[in-house]
Image (spheres, grey):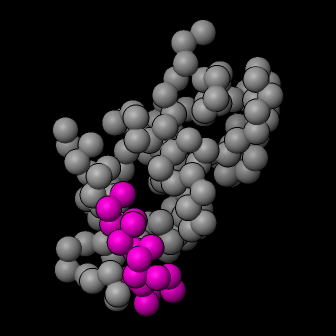
Amino acid sequence: MQKNETTAIINNSNIFDINDVLYDFRANFLNEIACREWVLKRLHPAGAYCPACGVAVPEKSLQRFWMSERVKCCHCEKFFTALTGTFLSGCQLDYREVILLAVLLSPDMTDKTIAEILDMSAANVRIWRNKFEALGKLKNG
């Protein structure tokens, strides 16, 4: 079986950048479910696959996967979530914060101001700004 690339940094079709978020940003993005769906659709446009072995997530586990709950691969028996193997893996931000961070990282907003709004350090904001800028460059070639 051919392994599917589910890592956002490797597969350009799975990348979203600041411009993508700004384009789609609406009032409903203040809703956790809408944010989760938006992010996961971009991270996994081809569907749900195990990041370790590339096997499709079985029907019985799909709801758990799309809810960002832990899933066990029926093939390799590794545990993972929808964020495993993506640039958001281990980020400790909820989906609303990811969207808000991407919106706030517009060139007009300082890292200090964003840090105050999101209650995080300016150093963390700089790290995320660098990640999103790298993703934008990767996406645009």
Identify the residue at horizontal 22%, vertical 48% (top origin): 137
Q: Decide which of 42, 132 is in the foreground and name it.
A: 132
Report x, y in % for residue 32.
Answer: 58, 67
Residue 69 drawn above or below residue 124: above
Residue reaching furthest to the top = 1
Q: Can you see residue 78?
A: yes
Residue 15 drawn above or below residue 97: above
Report x, y in % for residue 14.
Answer: 41, 40
Report x, y in % for residue 125.
Answer: 40, 74
Compared across the picture, whether 104 is left or right of 55 comes to left
Residue 7 drawn above or below residue 100: above
Compared across the picture, whether 125 is left or right of 137 comes to right
Identify the residue at horizontal 47%, vertical 54% (top origin): 38
Compared across the picture, whether 113 is left or right of 120 comes to left
Q: Decide which of 33, 54 is in the foreground and name it.
A: 54
Report x, y in % for residue 118.
Answer: 48, 82
Query: Is 81 inside the magenta-drawn segment?
Result: no
Residue 95 drawn above or below residue 43: below
- Identify the main secondary structure in magenta: helix
Q: Decide which of 116, 58 is in the foreground and name it.
A: 116
Quarter-of-image position of residue 113: bottom left
Quarter-of-image position of residue 77: top right
Identify the residue at horizontal 27%, vertical 83% (top origin): 110
Report the magenta residues as a range.
114-131
Quarter holding the N terminus is top right
Quarter holding the C terminus is top left
Identify the residue at horizontal 27%, vertical 58% (top origin): 133
